[in-house]
Amino acid sequence: MVAGDAHGAETQEEPKAQEDLGQQQTAQDKPQVSGTDWEKAVAERDEKIAALEAQVAEAAKNAEAAEQLRGEIAELKAQGESDRIDFKLQLAGVRNVKAARAILADHGGNVDALKEAEPWLFADAPVAKPQSGTTGLPNAGTSTDAGKTMKRWRKLAGLDDSNDKA
């Protein structure tokens, strides 16, 4: 039993020796820091944290500004597309832009397809030529002989010429 007791004593001493060895190695790995060095290190760390926080705040401001600019760009692009569609409709001779825009989506945004499917929405593209020619009647505003014209109108109206002589 003596051998067992000696073995048991060795087992208890080994972990203690290993602990001491570990503490020595840990002490060698850590640099010795005085109170002023530690305070300086903490101050440097705090300054670095403040600088990083400032960078984060600046990045957030830049991100907000970039997002705002992206929104403005998208709005301007949408307005430009809307103006382009209105212009195409007006060039096609649309009678009512608002009504045409309302049903343009039904035709895939194609103005030509809309014009073909809904011709009533568009005015005739060619301008009508003024009529020329004669009807065989004198012009309404001109008269060559006032007496002759009055006589003709009285005859058409069924009035007697004798009222004129009295």
Image (spheres, rainbow, N blue to C red):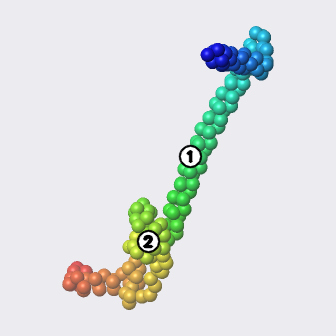
Name the residue beneath numbered marker 1. 71
Q: Nearer the viewer, residue 95 or 7?
A: 7
In the picture, measured across the screen, residue 135 lies left or right of residue 27, that is: left
N-terminal-most mark, 1 or 2? 1
Three-letter amino acid code of the residue under disc 2: Leu
Q: How many numbered discs?
A: 2
Q: Residue at x 20, y 84 (%)?
A: 158
Residues packed near mark 2 inside 10 Å, few (<14), some (14 to 19) or many (20 plus): many
What residue is shown with label 2?
114
Picture coordinates of residue 116, whole percent (x, y): 43, 76
Q: How far is the residue under mark 1 from the one under mark 2?
A: 31 Å
The residue at the point 39 percent across, 85 percent down is: 138
Q: Position of residue 84 (x, y in %)?
A: 54, 62
Residue 121, image x, y percentages: 40, 70
Q: Nearer the viewer, residue 13 or 16?
A: 13
Q: Amino acid at mark 1?
A: Gly
Is disc 1 placed on a helix, strand or loop? Answer: helix
Quadrant that contains the N terminus: top right
Residue 152 appears in the rendering? yes
Between 114 and 44, the one lying in front of the other is 44
Q: Quadrant of the C terminus?
A: bottom left
User: SS class of the residue under badge 2?
Assistant: helix
Label 1: few (<14), some or many (≥20) within 10 Å? few
